[in-house]
Amino acid sequence: QVQLVESGGGLVQPGGSLRLSCAASRTIFSIDVMGWYRQAPGKQRELVAIIGSSGGTNYADSVKGRFTISRDNAKNTVYLQMNSLKPEDTAVYYCHAHIYPKDNYWGQGTQVTVSS
């Protein structure tokens, strides 16, 4: 079992930055993949970024070059640095953990609103 708690969401103007944090209830060293997903009103949840246990990353095309995912195993925390935010980035952002072969865990989500 893994509990995930997100923080760092809020209201930001277009072009601004936010850093989301996801704190896990246990060591993330042995968690195979951790990631961030988002869901905008009326849309399906979509992948934003993932990071493997060895540090390999993958990003949605829409956020490449603007968002950076990282993990701090010592703090059991995963981060999402979001720069150059756009109104279309507005969504609830969810932290996700996957442990092979089939265990999946989700956080409760944190709202990000990009608006002037």
Image (cartoon, rainbow, N blue to C red):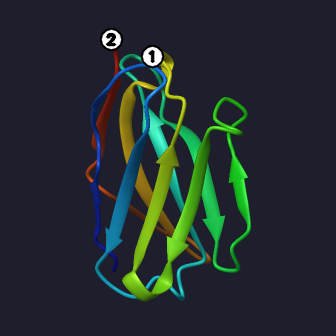
Q: Establish if 80 lies above or below 41.
A: below
Q: Residue at x 38, y 82 (%)?
A: 75
The label on residue 76 is none
C-alpha gap between disc 2 and disc 1: 9 Å
Q: Residue 44: horizontal and vertical position, in percent?
A: 48, 28
Where, quadrant-wise, is the C terminus in this rendering? Answer: top left
| In front of the other: 108 or 6 | 6
Which circle's residue, 2 or 1, is located before the other in the chain? 1
Circle 1 packing at 10 Å, graded few (<14), some (14-19), many (20+), is some
Q: Residue 97: horizontal and vertical position, in percent?
A: 47, 67
Residue at the spot of label 2 = 116
**Amino acid, disc 1:** Pro
Q: Secondary structure at mark 2?
A: loop
Q: Quadrant of residue 47?
A: top right
| In front of the other: 45 or 12 | 12
Q: Is residue 94 left or right of residue 86?
A: left
**Amino acid, disc 2:** Ser
Circle 2 packing at 10 Å, graded few (<14), some (14-19), many (20+), is few
Q: Secondary structure at mark 1?
A: helix
Q: Residue 32: horizontal and vertical position, in percent?
A: 60, 77
Residue at the spot of label 1 = 87
